[in-house]
């Protein structure tokens, strides 16, 4: 029996290690492709006159491609393993798909105005509006470490935003000029993206509590509805603007840029595989572990983006990055420790 328990423990630890490595690899590669697709001048392959390179400016076309691949992946798994579906009606997912269909394109649009590391750090501030609403609208009180953690996140993002690199190790506060206005607009887009994501998460939690739904059902039908919404949006744009529409220009770029086709395909595949790994990890090991892996994954994503795409980051901004992730880790650690301390106190009493 002892041997069997030991083997089960080792088997669980090995699976966790495999999940963790796979999630890091998939999501960091996904983030790399996301930044590459929206920032690369793709060489054009054609005969005759024409532009030498084209840039991807088509967030809705990117999102519908991702939604179709994710839907087909989930549908394929459910077809092979019918027990992994609860046979719920597709109609119940229409509402949560609307915000999801808008959130991703707005996030991609933000990359026109801010760097990818800035977007990741801003997205890491999700606890800030949650706590703000809780305090001022619901008179909620939070543990001391939540206040400290949110303060560290805010200060860290402020340092990363306000200090502009003028050399490898020097820094200065930005003067409010046109680039600074673009920066504010980019951050505003990320905050809108966060708000839409928050609504999507709450709506999906409501569906999970109201119906018997599996994660694959959610992945299958939410992506299906998103694809339907964006399809009609793109068709409407094509009917109104013809050859100047997003759908038409996206197809032209994909026709003449083989490198873009490959990046788009790998981006969609990594999204689908990442969602499957995420659902599997949460189901087997719990959401707290996913939060920890997610935070560290974001840190590695920022580091990879800085070094691969050569973003200029000075020591003050690096300290801001440290404060953001230190604040997030503080909440994770204390959330894990606090229940154990309360149980010990109750035992003593």
Image (tube, helix red, strand yellow):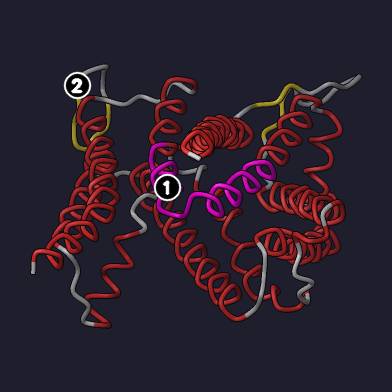
In the picture, the quarter occupied by the C terminus is: bottom left
Q: Position of residue 42 (x, y in %)?
A: 70, 26
Measured along the vertical axis of the image, is residue 343 above or below residue 279?
A: below
Q: Residue furthest top?
A: 168
Mark closer to the chain start, 1 or 2: 2
Residue extent of the magenta highlight? 271-296
Residue on which disc 1 sits: 289
Q: Position of residue 207 (x, y in %)?
A: 60, 75
Residue 170 badge = 2
The mark found on residue 88 in the picture is none
Mark 2 surroundings within 10 Å by alpha-carbon count, few (fewer than 14), some (14 through 19), many (20 or more): few
Residue 236 quadrant: bottom right
- Does the magenta run of residues contain 298? no
Q: Position of residue 26 (x, y in %)?
A: 59, 34
Q: Is residue 206 above or below residue 338?
A: below
Disc 1 crowd, CA 10 A, few/some/many (<14, 14-19, 20+): some
Marks 1 and 2 close (CB-CB < 8 Å): no
Q: Residue at x 50, y 72 (%)?
A: 202
Q: Residue 326 versus residue 137: which sits nearer the camera? A: 326
């Amino acid at each position: 029996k002892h041997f069997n328990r030991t083997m089960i423990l080792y088997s669980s630890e090995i699976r966790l290690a495999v999940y963790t490595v796979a999630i890091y690899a998939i999501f960091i590669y996904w983030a790399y492709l996301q930044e590459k697709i929206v920032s690369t001048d793709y060489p054009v392959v054609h005969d005759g006159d024409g532009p030498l390179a084209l840039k991807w400016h088509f967030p809705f076309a990117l999102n519908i491609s991702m939604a179709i691949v994710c839907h087909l992946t989930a549908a394929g798994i459910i077809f092979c393993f019918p027990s992994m579906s609860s046979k719920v009606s597709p109609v119940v997912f229409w509402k949560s798909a609307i915000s999801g269909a808008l959130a991703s394109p707005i996030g991609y649009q933000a990359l026109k105005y801010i760097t990818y590391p800035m977007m990741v750090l801003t997205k890491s501030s999700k606890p800030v509006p949650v706590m703000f609403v809780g305090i001022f609208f619901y008179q909620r009180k939070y543990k001391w470490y939540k206040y400290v953690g949110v303060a560290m996140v805010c200060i860290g993002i402020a340092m990363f935003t306000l200090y502009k690199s003028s050399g490898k190790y020097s820094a200065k506060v930005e003067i409010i000029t046109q680039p600074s206005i673009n920066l504010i607009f980019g951050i505003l887009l990320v905050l809108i993206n966060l708000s839409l994501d928050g609504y999507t998460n709450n709506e999906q939690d409501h569906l999970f509590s109201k119906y018997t739904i599996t994660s694959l059902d959610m992945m299958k039908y939410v992506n299906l509805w998103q694809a339907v919404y964006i399809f009609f949006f793109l068709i409407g744009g094509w009917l109104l603007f013809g050859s100047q529409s997003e759908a038409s220009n996206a197809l032209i770029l994909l026709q003449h840029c083989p490198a873009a086709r490959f990046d788009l395909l790998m981006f969609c595949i990594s999204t689908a595989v990442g969602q499957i790994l995420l659902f599997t990890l949460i189901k087997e090991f719990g959401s707290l572990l996913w939060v920890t892996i997610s935070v560290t994954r974001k840190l590695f994503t920022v580091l990879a983006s800085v070094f691969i795409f050569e973003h200029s980051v000075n020591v003050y901004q690096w300290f801001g990055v440290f404060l953001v992730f230190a604040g997030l880790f503080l909440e994770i650690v204390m959330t894990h420790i606090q229940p154990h301390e309360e149980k010990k106190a109750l035992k003593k009493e």
